[in-house]
Amino acid sequence: MERSQVSDCESGISGSTHEVDSPFGFENGLIRVDEGEQAYHSIKQKLVSGLGVLGSQTTIQGVYKSSYQGLIKEIKLKIFGIFSKAVEKKNGGSANVEFAWYGASSMDEINAILSHGFAPKTNNAGSYGHGIHLSPSNFPLGSLKSAVADENGVRHLLLCRVILGKMEVVPPGSGQWHPSSEEFDSGVDDSVAPRKYIVWSTNMNTHILPQYVVSFRVPASVKGVQRNSVPLRLPNSPWISFPALVSALGKFLPPQSMKLITKYQKDHRERRITRHEMIQHVRKLAGDDLLATIIKAQRDKQKSIN
């Protein structure tokens, strides 16, 4: 996603400035993004492609952007710019500002975030430290499990700009609450193929700027994917061959990650690493949610044929 296509932080909100009523009960001056706008197409493409096999079955119900109009919201916008420049200066020229997804449990949570900011998360304990967990813009699947469907099956994701600065790897099960030293600004699960960004609670309302709300529907079967109910039988799954799995992963994993997977596959063939080691490398690069989605889709496809 090109930053210039969806970023309103530095130049103000472009396009229509009239507020519209959302059918989902959103408040706080959100503005509907028309389907003909470039920002709509960029966001839709990122969401659909990032959901992998679920993307073709995903329907966008609406895209809304925050106007950041009014005294308090204008101050929030300026604060984000100030901290961005401060982190840029601290790190010698790069604030490492990226777009990232946040899965909201309800429209009430979104309204609360837009009105008052993020609240400390207590249910992240035992995961990757205590903080706000977001997923990279090319991996909305990582936030899908947090986006709880309402009574009509509609889910909501926030697309935010995030000041990441210098990131440190936070291991699973970490009880970390803050950077391990002044050198770091945020956390990440994997420095090579990140699937989770961790913004510490002390920075959650200065380093995260919600810009868009995306409302959408995905198949009900996503619940099974979220629980990882499909066994990850790699690489000899009865539902998909390992080469076919690699091919499927190549549709949305970055080239650098695919290069590493190909390397591990070659190392396994040449008996430099064990089958178990290869599996662990692939799971670390792709993430279990994505692997489970691909395997389940292939299993369902084979069942429909049979």
Image (spheres, rainbow, N blue to C red):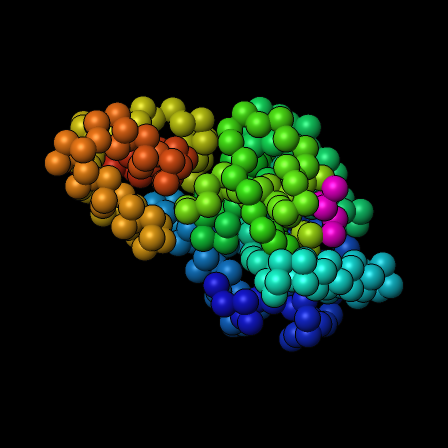
13 shown above or below 204: below
User: Looking at the image, which residue is at 29% across and 49% down?
Assistant: 258
For the stretch drawn in magenta, the main secondary structure is loop
At a point 55% along the width and 71% down the height, the residue shown is 4
- Lateral position of residue 110 relative to residue 145, left or right: right
Quarter assignment of residue 295: top left
Residue nearest the observer in this picture, 124 or 163: 163
Q: Residue at x 19, y 38 (%)?
A: 267
Q: Is residue 276 left or right of residue 68?
A: left
Q: Nearer the viewer, residue 261 or 68?
A: 261
Res 84 quadrant in image: bottom right
Residue 217 within the magenta-colored segment of the rendering: no
**Residue at coordinates 57% horizontally, 27% vertically from top-left?**
174
Q: Position of residue 190 (x, y in %)?
A: 46, 41
Left or right of 230 in this view: 151: right
Query: How far from the left and from the top, in percent, is residue 281?
Result: 32, 35
Say if 180 sits above or below 113 in the image. above
> 194 or 103: which is nearer to us?
194
Residue 303 in sight from this viewpoint? no
Quadrant in which the C terminus appears? top left
Residue 203 belongs to the span the image colors magenta: yes
Residue 136 visible (yes or no) = yes
Q: Residue 108: horizontal and vertical position, in percent? A: 72, 41
Report the span colored magenta: 202-206
Task: Please say if 109 is above or below 33.
Answer: above
Q: Residue furthest right?
A: 71
